[in-house]
Image (spheres, rainbow, N blue to C red):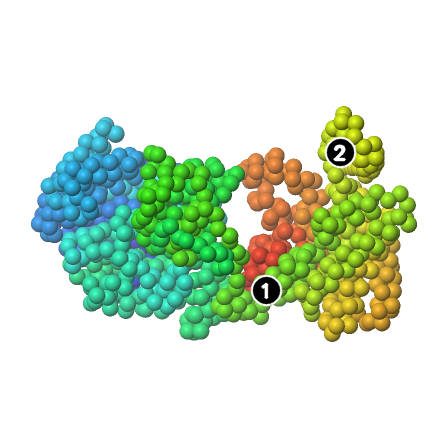
Amino acid sequence: MTTMKQVYIFKEGSTKMRSLLGGKGCELSEMTRIGLPVPPGLVITTEQCLLYQKTKKISRSLESDIFKALSFVEKQVGKKFGDRDNPLLVSVRSGAPVSMPGMMDTILNLGLNDQTVVGFAKLTNERTAYDAYRRLIQMYGEIVFEIKKEKFDKIFDSVKEQHHRKQDVELTPDELKEIISKFKILVHEETGKQFPWDPKEQLILAIQAVFDSWNNQRAITYRNLYKIDHNMGTAVVVQSMVFGNTGNSSGTGVAFTRDPSTGQKKLYGEYLLNAQGEDVVAGIRTPKHIELMKKEMPKQYKELERIAKLLEKHYRDMQDMEFTIENGKLWMLQTRNGKRTAAAAIKIAVSMVKEKLISKEEAIMRIQPSQIEQLLHRQIDPKVKIISIAKGLPASPGAATGKIVFTADEAAELGKKEKVMLVAVETTPDDIHGMIASQGILTSRGGMTAHAAVVARGIGLPCVVGCEAAKIDLSKKTLTINGEVFKQGDVITIDGSTGAVIKGEVKLVNPTISDEFGIFLGWCDSISRMYVRANADTPSTAKGAREFGAKGIGLCRTERMFNDSDRLPFMQKMIMSENLEERKRWLSKLKEFQSKDFYEILLSMDGFPVTIRLLDPPLHEFLPKLEELLSEITVLSSKKIDEIVLMEKEKILKKVRELSEFNPMLGHRGSRLGITYPEIYEMQVTAIFEAAAKLKKEGKNPQVEIMVPLIGNVNELKILKPLIISTANSVLVRENVKLNYTVGTMIEIPRAALTADEIAKEADFFSFGTNDLTQTTLGFSRDDAEAKFLQLYLSKNIYPSNPFEVVDSGVGKLVDIAVRLGRTTKKNLKVGVCGETGGEPNSITFYHNVGLDYVSCSQFRVPIARLACAQATIMEKKSNKRN
């Protein structure tokens, strides 16, 4: 929707205008509306950003509206923009409808020049004025003129060194003037232009630069990462400046209404005396913890606490606030829903339900499935004794190990092939591509609200910041800690939960579920229509899945049990058998292994259904590869060693050639194998029910579901189902045990989906194997597609996402058809999914909508799937209410 109004002053906006005024603009307007101390300002709408992207010019009408609104701000503040004696200074900030911290540009102190700085010095003090002026030239030079930050830093650091100043605040007004003079020369050398004198020109060029930053590379990367719409644009906030660098009665800070790392209900954040906001956020100086503000500025701290409580109650969510104290007066510069770790998100959601601020449904909808994934980060094994070589601030939880790299570009490149640890003095928004590719981040500077900390928490990366013992030499590519030198490629470990830095690789362990996490997931289960099972092939995996809340196993792949080194020889001997009698002899040996496996898995899931898929892959997969055999035979022949060994290898080679196929995925596998060699399925079913009978006699409650793979024609199931039932019943009669069980099939080829009404006459349940169903529907070999052309297809938007990760629309139609057809035959037919998409949130929403009963996924995706199932149910209820 396009509006006629191009610019709003704060009192005209509200939190309901987010898409038009952006997050920052609408929240500043809202804080103004509810009476909080907010420096006056104006907002240029997102619509103007999108228009600017087409023309790359600010229209005359927009320019006119900007200065009309600015004149209103001037009246509110009692200062005039560009006035020599009483100058109004403004900041220009981005503010997209969706929070993108640090991804776009900000310029402070606009309105200063050689004349207005003198007047500003009289209103404040000389040091504050010239400190603000040098900051303006640097920020303007970096953002508008695209001069490298390092060139300004080099000048700044050389002047500090020349005058023996350790801290920025020690620089005198004359020394700041020296820096300003050198900054101006740098701007002229780099651009051929003078630094803009006219404040109005400064403002318009700054607004253009912020609009341009909507499409800078780091912003695009961030939007891609978080799947943010590229066509929403950013608003621009022009706000009167207040100054935290006017002396020790002034300061600036960032505060959260709750701890963003743990979720604890207490004011959390950092501040600096005699500083501007960029000093805290950019990690230029190491800030103080907000607790110390109680002693240094008790009145302002009490006021900040009051405002924090008011904002959290007003927005019904944890808030991230920026504030400045100017000569003792507290000003609020921003509030937004605070980014938080997954652990904090869960704790805050549960706490706010208990505090009656939000409902359970709201709590569930506030948690992103990707946050749950972060919660499942690995930790340092508590049994391992570690000695940390340094300690920083614990900025983002989880532990990580990796090879040291010193730049984001190196991290992005090397991170494709190996685990890397990004080590930096500090990170900037331009480093986002390298941060994403790293296992973790270590910085020597910055605080808990520095760029590295905020981004790491957002993407779930372990991060340690402000590690002052870490001395980084980028030119030599070395990290020195307490005299010990680490080079690029050396391995270190960090613990983002404690701030520890450890030499070398440390054993990491998988996470456990906290009490709040358990409560939260319990709410999810109570709301969900679908439930979640796990794909598990071993007792340990089954046990882990149950701990994560799986209500059964949706896929137990029996073939994986044959690959252990103590079993594979027996499997190979069975395959090599020349007659039925010999084959059965080796199958009886394999049955001993299988019975034990099934006993332990059924025990791990006692009382819950366990779907056991009978042997699926072609037999040649269990034999040595053709190329390896040929090579071995060639070597053996040349050495003329034992003829018996050579004959045995040649016999295996003959069998491999006999079993080899041009397209094994569509070949002699699944039900086709069972029909050709029924004794294999007979052995497996016997092993399953012997294990179940034993458990039943022990007072347990095994719930067995036998699944036949790769059924494409109901006649295949008509042959195999009687074999399964006959074998199972024979065991149960022999063991004198009664046990209910079901026999179903995987739907994994298009013909099965299209004839599901026929197959449902024989099958007790369906389970969609979306990995193979996707391959056979799209005509893709997954390995070949992903290796050769799928990335190109994704980049050209031929497919919106990887169809092996997110259910494809064509595959989805087959699923929908199969569910409908199957239930025309059996109204209450149980239907689930056990492919990879069964743990993917968008796919889960689809499976909910087409009426599946459950999804099954890997054990570590079980909590994610439990949340996604609940969210799908809530969204359906909301949709029904609207309709």
In primary-sequence order, the first of circles 2 and 1 is: 1
Which three-letter amino acid code belongs to the residue tagged 1? Glu
Please tell me the numbered disc located at residue 629: 2
Residue 460 x %, y % = 46, 53
Is residue 304 in view?
yes
Residue 682 x %, y % = 84, 56
Identify the secondary structure beneath mark 1: helix
Residue at 79%, 57% in the rendered image:
592
Residue 702 x %, y % = 73, 68
How far apart marks 2 and 1 lie (CA) works out to 43 Å
Identify the secondary structure beneath mark 2: helix
Q: Nearer the viewer, residue 516 or 113?
A: 516
Q: Is 343 situated above or below 211?
A: below
Residue at 74%, 74% in the rendered image:
699
Task: Classify 10 Å Cα crowding around label 1: few (below 14), some (14-19), many (20 and above).
Answer: some
Please tell me the numbered disc located at residue 547: 1
Residue that sits furthest to the front in the current view? 641
Is residue 58 in view?
no
Question: Is 555 on the left or on the right of 487, as rendered?
Answer: right
- Image quadrant in which you'd find residue 650: top right
